[in-house]
Image (cartoon, rainbow, N blue to C red):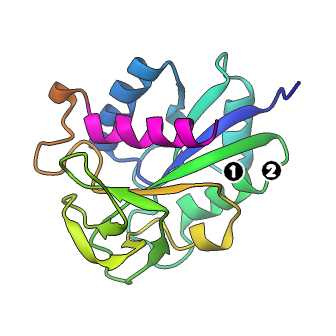
Amino acid sequence: MNSKKKVILITDGDAAAKQAIQTAADNLGCHIVWESGGNPTRISGEQILNFISKSEKDLVLVMFDDCGFPEEGPGESALIEVVNSPEVEILGAVAVASQSYSHEWTRVDFSIDKNGVITEYGVDKDGIIDTEIGRIRGDTVYSLDSLEIPIIVGVGDLGKMGGRDSVQLGSPITKLAIELILERSG
């Protein structure tokens, strides 16, 4: 029997993202590592792993945020440590698009646009389908390609996307991204 906590990585941690993730977690029965949120993430991967291990639930959502730091910032340093830990099972990542000035990008297996449509194209911060197939731009996505993550889902800015992912609507895009990772991870 596998006793490792199952983890979904989320590359956003601002106030709107926290609310959207909370709404999705409430509907899906997940635990959230609140301490990893913020803009940027202010705790280490080791500290995050400690919080994950103390979760009473098997499925844990963890936020990582670089706050626009170019290349590997504090959120990504923590993310790398968590992904490389043998203590957890990484199910996938929700890669959040942003208007990154450093032009960081990552491959995605697919994206979800602001209308909840699954697409092979990337999406932008507003959840609008982009011109490139299989990749998005963001500020906490620099390291995702170099890590072993089973599935990466691209989305627009959590809790926003022109109101289409608002908490009042139940954060449907955030919830769908997490559900698809769960579905495809078995």
How many C-alpha atoms fall within 10 Å of the one at disc 1: few (<14), some, or many (≥20)?
A: many
Report if the CB atoms under discs 1 and 2 are less than 8 Å apart: yes
Q: Main secondary structure of the magenta part?
A: helix
Residue 120 visible from this viewpoint: yes
C-alpha span from label 1 to label 2: 9 Å
The reply, left or right, for residue 25 in relation to residue 20 is right
For residue 178, above or below residue 133 = above
Quarter of the figure with residue 72: bottom right
Q: What residue is drawn where x is 26% and y is 33%?
A: 171
Q: Amino acid at mark 1?
A: Gly
Say which residue label 2 marks.
Answer: 85
Near-viewer residue (41 or 81): 81
Direction from residue 84 to residue 60 in the image, left or right: left
Label placed on residue 118: none
The image shows residue 146 at horizontal and vertical percentages of: 66, 73
Q: Which residue is mark 1?
A: 45
Tally the marks: 2
Q: Residue furthest bottom?
A: 102
Task: Please tell me which residue is depicted at 58% across the width and 67% down the height of the picture.
Answer: 144
Earlier along the polypeptide chain: callout 1 or callout 2? Answer: 1
> Does 27 appear above or below 5?
above
Is 150 on the left-hand or right-hand side of 86? left
* Element under disc 2: loop
Q: Quadrant of the C terminus?
A: top right
Image quarter of residue 69:
bottom left
The answer to whether residue 158 is left or right of residue 47 is left
Residue type at mark 2: give it: Ser
Residue 112 located within the stretch drawn in magenta: no
| Start-end of magenta stretch | 171-186
In the foreground, 93 or 176: 176
Q: Position of residue 173 (x, y in %)?
A: 29, 42
Q: Residue placed at 49% from the left, 67% from the top?
A: 141
